[in-house]
Amino acid sequence: MALDASVFSPPPWRVSLMAALPIGLCLLVMAVPAVGHGHALAYRTLYLLAFLAWVPVLIWLQRALWRAGWSPWKTVPLLLAVTYLMAVVNNVLGFLLPEAMGWSGAQPPRWPRVFFGVDDCWLALIAYCAANALVGHSHALKEAQSRQTQALLAARDAELRALRYQLNPHFLFNTLNGVSSLVAQARGEEARTMLARLGGFLRATLDRPSHEVSVAEELAMTETYLAIEQVRLGDRLRVEWDIGAGVLDASLPSLLLQPLVENAIRHGIARRSAAGRLSIALHARAGELQLRVVNDLAPDDEAQGGQTLGHANVRQRMAWLYPQRHAFAAGLEDGVYVVAIAIPFQRLDPRGDAA
């Protein structure tokens, strides 16, 4: 597969400079045997200093080529030529070193040989260009992964918000219809109470900044919803609560319970002429937060909505929030309809994040 120049992104200068450290250390180690051997140490020191001086130039050049979008097939030959010329300059400096240092007995430089014997200097500069390219490649991949992660998180956040705001229009229609009936019956105070509860419910639904809330908050929201339905259904709706110890500060997806309760009322309790029981249980067991919603069925009703919008909403949100770490089951059980959910038990810290 051909390399794409767009993959390479200029890393920060300090990172490119640090890429020169291993090669500089190698040159330093190579200079150690020259200690005490005449002028050899001076030459090694010269080449090390020359290498360090060329590094910023190579960093600037590679960054310019990456920004210009040069392909590796054009970049590599150019860098080979530039580093070769740098090595030649190093040779020139080496030829001039004896005269500059005033060494006695030094032979005059043989300038035609300045283009030969550049192996060590050239190899070090080439190695640095390769190291800097690898650093740039790694930096670009990390940036791409970071952008991809941010995009996935943004998509996840948007999906969760869309699912959370997916209020059932039947609920709004029934509530407003109930308010209209109360007004027609001259029960203005009850109508105002119902509207105030509806407003509070909608405000709390839209204002929640986090996808996860405490069980206590979710129960308060559900109680507000049930109070609205209680006005509409009256004694036909009988609610039973079974909340286990130590679960109120546990983390729960926002508006997870309300769609299940709404589904139970719409497809079960509201279709009954007699009173119906709605049971809501929450317990912590074996490292899981277990939720169970049970409702009576209408007479001769053998099914309850199947894969309803409320169930599909909850399934999707749990798949986003707890991939491979949740359970969802719904169906008839001993003449009643049961929805059972299990998610990891996590306590909510004061900042609103699951701990």
Image (cartoon, rainbow, N blue to C red):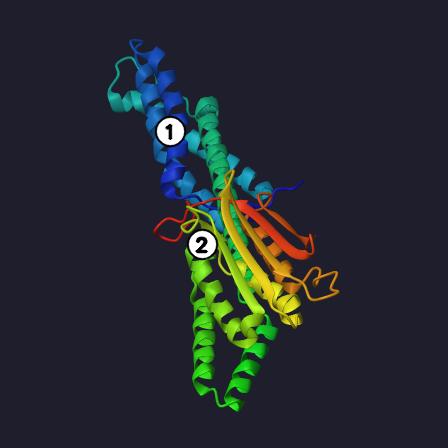
Residue for point 35% across, 52% down:
351
Residue 52 position within the rendered picture, expressed as x and y whole percent measured from the top left:
35, 31
**Please, what is the three-letter code of the amino acid marked with disc 1?**
Leu
Query: Can residue 91 be seen?
Result: no
> Is 256 above or below relative to 144?
below
* Identity of the residue furthest to the top in this view: 36
Q: Count the labels in the image.
A: 2
Check disc 2 and report the residue beneath it: 215
Sort mark 1 into few (<14), some (14-19) or many (20+) by Cα contacts within 10 Å: few
In front: label 2 or label 1: 2
Q: Give the numbered dot on residue 168.
A: none
SS for callout 1: helix
**Please, what is the three-letter code of the amino acid marked with disc 2?**
Val
SS for callout 2: helix
Question: Which is nearer the eye, 178 or 299?
Answer: 299
> Is 82 above or below relative to 261?
above
Residue 253 position within the rendered picture, expressed as x and y whole percent measured from the top left:
50, 55
Q: Please state, as top left, top right, bottom left or bottom right, where the N terminus lies in the image.
A: top right
Question: Which is nearer the eye, 351 or 330?
Answer: 330
Residue for point 70% across, 63% down:
305
Query: Can residue 19 be seen?
Result: yes
Left or right of residue 72: residue 346: left
Looking at marks 2 and 1 on the same chain, the residue that comes earlier in the sequence is marked by: 1
> Is 121 above or below relative to 277?
above
Question: Which is nearer the eye, 226 or 86?
Answer: 226
Check disc 1 and report the residue beneath it: 21
Question: Which is nearer the eye, 329 or 66?
Answer: 329
